[in-house]
Amino acid sequence: MKNKYFIFTIIIFMGLIAFNFNKVVTAQQSNNLLIIPPDSSQTTSTPTILPTPEIIPPNIKNINIDDLKQSLVINEIKGRYICQNIGGCPNIDKKGETEITIKSAIITGISNDSLNIKIFDINYDVDLTDAKILRSQWIGTDLNNFSNGDIVNVYGFLDENNFHLIHAQTVRNMSLYKNLVIFNGIISNPINNTFILKTEKNDDINVIVNNDTKIIKVESAACIMIYPPVDCPKSIAHLISFNDLKNDDRAIVRGNWENNSNHFIAEQIIVGNDGREFFNKKLDIQNNVKNQESLREQIKNQIKNLEEQIKKLREQTKIQSSH
């Protein structure tokens, strides 16, 4: 009797185990059916930028410490973005405006009418169409005097559809300090860390390159798999050496005159082409040089003709005196 009871107990126990096991398997199968593979269309990709960008060290000479403290302020001055998302709020304009004030951003790219800047590891495109462009002392300047690595303050408005695009009202370049001198021209005879910069005003500037000079080559950039669009610069820059400079290279040269000398000590030399006006407009410098050479040749010919005429007159004088 006891054996029968024992066998019956084992059968019931095994039945319970089998029932629970089936429940576990069923639950696992159900859970597996609920797992949804990630949508590949939702994955993000970073752009491949050609050529590869390089970080240019910031140009901070003669900038006060307080002016190097970064600041980013975004303030909605008309309307409320949250209200727009829920269909509007009472007494609020449908179209809002969001102002942005940036202090001490670093220029990472330059083109003909825009900048790429970075602050707190956030990238912004800056539209300069309506912007006043200023030096540090609030004097007007233009984009041809800018360099990658410059420190800028920007005030403007965020684009309504792209919060990484700023429509600038003012851009103040803190790296263009009071006594910084800037020349644009063509490089001639680069040798032994010196060259002649021929400017559009027909000036020949004796430029000296030292160990502190940054020589920057700029060029247009192409992006592949762009996401998000703000991470795609319009131009990039990288450092090069003096030996990379060539005759007839267009160059923006920034620096100061050497004391008691006619030599110009370069702080930054920008060559290449990032789309700015200077790198693309027609220059008369080459024509001026050719005209000067032609004028010298004409003067030499005139002197030669005069010498021949003088020689003939002397010969005639000798003949007359002999008679």
Image (spheres, rainbow, N blue to C red):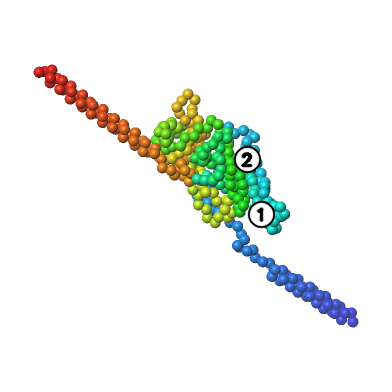
**Element under disc 2:** strand
**Element under disc 1:** loop
Give the number of callouts: 2
Which residue is at a point 81% across and 75% down the rendered structure image?
16
As displayed, is residue 216 above or below residue 318? below
Residue 148 rendering spot, x and y as whole percentages:
53, 41
Residue situated furthest left in the rendering: 323
Q: Is residue 243 visible?
A: no
Please tell me in which quadrant of the rendered image residue 203 appears: top left
Which residue is at a point 34% across and 35% down the rendered structure image?
291
Residue 245 rendering spot, x and y as whole percentages:
43, 39
Q: What residue type is labelled 1?
A: Lys
Please tell me in which quadrant of the rendered image residue 107 appears: top right
- Report crowding for label 2: few under 14, some 14 to 19, many 20 or more residues within 10 A (C-alpha): many
Please tell me in which quadrant of the rendered image residue 191 appears: top left
Residue 126 rendering spot, x and y as whole percentages:
57, 46
Tell me the residue that label 2 is attached to.
103
Tell me the residue that label 1 is attached to.
94
Which residue is at a point 47% across and 33% down the rendered structure image?
209
**Residue 183 shown left or right of residue 35 in the figure:** left
**Distance from the alpha carbon under mark 1 to that under mark 2:** 30 Å
Q: Which amino acid does label 2 sit on?
A: Lys
Q: Looking at the rendering, in which quadrant would you find the C terminus?
A: top left
